[in-house]
Amino acid sequence: VEIKCKPNTAVDYSAGAYWFWMKDANWSDTTKDFGGTIVYSSNVERKPINTQSSSRRTVSPPTTHQNTEEFCNILICDLSKADGGNYQFRYINGEDKWVTDPPTNLTVEENPCP
């Protein structure tokens, strides 16, 4: 399944910028950051990808894309019921930070085929 994201603000791809997708994220007033399962990250040193997610999820298009309107789409492959939840995209470039809100809810049902 592909979850699409269309930024409504300018996006700067400078060296310090990074972005990631989170599942079931919550804001922490203590850390002033989101906590949740990271399912994709453009900078795995700053935001490591959950080990169960790393081989199954890819960003569509890749980070070398040229279309600003599509740079944050995510393609999730080999879905299971455990993939169900709320997904949000987070962009960080220094003090320029934003997140998709509301989250996109993904519901995965068992395959009814024998």
Image: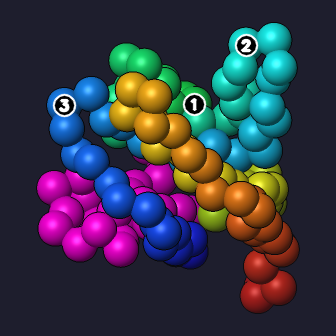
Measured in 3D between alpha carbons, the distance from the residue under mark 2 to the one under mark 3, in whole angstroms, is 24 Å
Q: In which quadrant of the rendered image does the C terminus lie?
A: bottom right
Q: Nearer the viewer, residue 22 or 110?
A: 22
| Residue 42 drawn in magenta | no
Q: Earlier in the sequence, mark 1 or mark 2?
A: 2
44 to the left or right of 3:
left
Q: Nearer the viewer, mark 1 or mark 2?
A: 2
Q: For mark 1, give the secondary structure.
A: loop
Is residue 77 shown to the viewer in this render?
A: no
For the record, the magenta segment spans 55-78
In percent of width and height, residue 16 lies at 27, 28
Counting other residues with Cα less than 10 Å from the Cα at mark 1, is it few (<14), some (14-19), or many (20 or more)? some
**Residue 50, labelled with which disc?**
1
Residue named by callout 2: 31
Counting other residues with Cα less than 10 Å from the Cα at mark 2, is it few (<14), some (14-19), or many (20 or more)? few
Residue named by callout 3: 15
Q: Are marks 3 and 1 in contact (CB under 8 Å)?
A: no
Q: For mark 3, give the secondary structure.
A: loop
Q: How is the image coloured?
A: rainbow
The disc labelled 3 sits on which kind of residue?
Ala
In percent of width and height, residue 113 lies at 76, 88
